[in-house]
Amino acid sequence: MTLISNILVGVVAALHAYFLVLEMFFWTQPLGLRVFNMTLQKAQDSAVLAANQGLYNGFLAAGLLYGIFAANAAVGFQFKVFFLLCVIVAGLYGGYSVSPRIIYIQAVPAVIALIFVWMAHR
């Protein structure tokens, strides 16, 4: 069960690393414009904010990876729970404020991972 939960946490971390790359490096590029359904002008106007958001997504990914690889299992569990909860809250807020699609892309995978983390911890 621990292996499965760590794989799921790793998937959530990989998603947030991907969000970092999109928001920091591809925001004004064709890929970013397509993924976020924006005009070039809108992307250029918000590029600094997107880069900041991307950095925060990187912090989420880093915290989740630390949870997976922590030498102390109890500390790793705490990191995974904390950062998954952060991802869930961010996904719910994004779903409310930007697009309901964000709930499915960000929050749902984190909820599933959190369930498995809790089951593995029991």
Image (cartoon, rainbow, N blue to C red):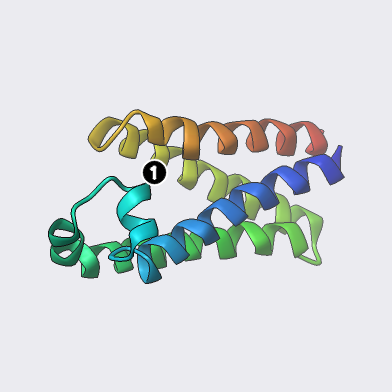
Which quadrant holds the C terminus?
Answer: top right
| Residue density around tag 1, few if under 14, some if 14–19, many if 20 or more, within 10 Å | some
Q: What residue does disc 1 label?
A: 90
Q: Nearer the viewer, residue 66 or 72?
A: 66
Identify whether 3 is placed above or below 122.
below
- Residue 79 place in picture, x, y as percent: 63, 55
Q: Quadrant location of residue 120?
A: top right
Task: Tell me which residue sits at (64%, 31%) in the image.
Answer: 112
Task: Tell me which residue sits at (66%, 48%) in the image.
Answer: 11
Task: Tell me which residue sits at (76%, 53%) in the image.
Answer: 74
Identify whether 52 is placed above or below 1.
below
Which quadrant holds the N terminus?
Answer: top right
Residue 65 relative to residue 21: left or right: right
Task: Tell me which residue sits at (20%, 60%) in the image.
Answer: 43
- Residue 96 place in picture, x, y as percent: 28, 31
Q: Quadrant location of residue 117?
A: top right
Amino acid on which the number 1 mark rests in the picture: Ala
Identify whether 105 is placed above or below 51.
above
Residue 87 relative to residue 92: left or right: right
- Residue 55 place in picture, x, y as percent: 40, 68
Residue 87 relative to residue 30: left or right: right
Identify whether 84 is placed above or below 97.
below
